Image: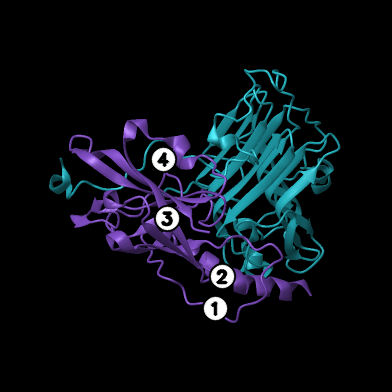
Chain colours: A cyan, B purple
Amino acid sequence: MRVTVLRSSGVLGLAAGALLAGALTPATAATAPGEGSAYGASAQVSLLPGVLGQGGLTVDTGTLAASSTAGPASASVADVPLRGLVTARAITSAAEHATSTGQVEANASIVDATLPVLAGLTGGTPSASVIAAKCASTASGVTGSSQVVGLDLGQLGTVPVAAAPNTALGLPGIVQVIVNEQIHHDDGSLTVNALHIKLLGGQLTGALGSGDIVLASATCGKATTPPDAPGTPDAPSTPASPNATAAGLGQVSIVPAGAPQTGDGSLATLIEK
Amino acid sequence: MRRNGFRRWAAVLFAIFATALLAGCGADAAAPAAPLTPAPPPATPPVAAPTWVNLPSIGARSSLVPLGLNADRTVQVPPVDQPLQAGWYQYSPPPGQAGPAVILGHIDGNRQKGIFWRLHEMKTGDQVQVGQANGGTLTFTVTKVDQVAKKEFPTDAVYGNTADPELRLITCGGAFDAADRNYLDNIIVYAKLVT
């Protein structure tokens, strides 16, 4: 199990204020009907000295492994400039607009993540085997959900696999962790952030710094009207794909490639036909 | 204060996650001891993670380790040197939640019979029990047993959405291609929750 520490050349010394000016929540960009987007991770933070190494650290990663209905439809990265704030084995995202049904789906996931940035608060480096967010739009509305598997944040609490929307943990004045953050925008679109870590400032003992880290984010605009009017014989009243049922969500958040390899054949001669 | 609330959560949820935290590869995820006293569940409790699976008709029972993805995006399987260990694909819904919960096990490994050595003998109507981290037991009934070529793996049927809670048990089968060190088929058991 190879674990890649995600790092690259970061920019030191940017003013924290400048970072905070650019809000992470993608509320600024309108998401029109039929549009969707997702990204694996994003960090805009300014860490105090000693939180991760000797000096302070300022990071602005932009959106990593970003995908969109405007393209690319999917993205995947294994080497991400998160400066050791967060590590992961794989980060992927995908966004799709099915013009035949009008439905929009977007998802993002992170496999085998660790969060060294929180280690000082949680008494050990927190890890999660899965951090995933997804959303889907159908004629009946826009829905979203998150999955965070195995994340223990020590004194901050343990994160449920399927947390209720906008479940918040944290230490006042230091850090707030929002699980399954769901932001409904004025244009009817929905953003789901599986994990949103807000560093709240540097005044209190135990402070980490300031800024935002978002892990696994998906945004879906409203569904579009299918080109075929209802009643037209061509109109797919029942979606052909089982992944487009009532809720419009993929219940399996990541569909694996290929077929499982479950056996080494060491007894194969006994069962060969 | 909030922290008390978090501790209550932690107590309830520790059992659920103990298995996941042990995960790695080959960790023995035998049922963790129930910690502390039960606290009131959250308003909308998530479906508990699965901890064991029992297939009485073929005499197979195993704890479950969580399985993720390999770097090539194929599904992880339990360590092949522990062929009696089954696992739950953690990107699938937990058993008991709407959707296809996927459980994988080896047919063989390390010159021993695997947990799903006899999976192909399962019959429609057979029962499958799944234990949950909250102490619950779910019963599923087999609706279909399939043997399919790996190169025609029925991704939609296995991983596609379902209206109700379902289960997929998967192992290898068919002829073994010694050159590729690979079984040519998969055995797939489909089951649905008994309500």
Q: CA distance from mark 3 to mark 4?
A: 27 Å
Query: Could you say which disc has been placed on residue B121 in the image?
Result: none
Residue position marked by numbered label 4 in the rendering: B74
Are the residues tagged 3 and 2 within 8 Å (C-beta)? Answer: no
Q: Are discs 3 and 2 located on one and the same chain?
A: yes
Q: Residues within 10 Å of mark 4 (few under 14, many from 20)?
A: some
Residue position marked by numbered label 3 in the rendering: B141
Residue farthest to the right, as pictured: A186
Q: Which mark lies nearer to you, 3 or 4?
A: 3
Q: Are discs 1 and 3 located on one and the same chain?
A: yes
Query: Considering only order in the chain, which callout, 4 or 1, is on the residue closer to the N terminus?
Result: 1
Which residue is found at the position 56% from the left and 36% from the top? A243
Query: Could you say which disc has been placed on residue B35 in the image?
Result: 1
Q: Amino acid at mark 2?
A: Phe
Pinpoint the chain carrying mark 3.
Answer: B
Pinpoint the chain carrying mark 2.
Answer: B
Query: Considering only order in the chain, which callout, 2 or 3, is on the residue closer to the N terminus?
Result: 2
Q: CA distance from mark 1 to mark 2?
A: 7 Å
Q: Amino acid at mark 1?
A: Pro
Q: CA distance from mark 4 to mark 2?
A: 29 Å
Are the residues tagged 4 and 2 within 8 Å (C-beta)? Answer: no
Q: Which mark lies nearer to you, 1 or 3?
A: 3
Q: Amino acid at mark 4?
A: Thr
Residue farthest to the left, as pictured: A269
Q: Secondary structure under badge 1?
A: loop
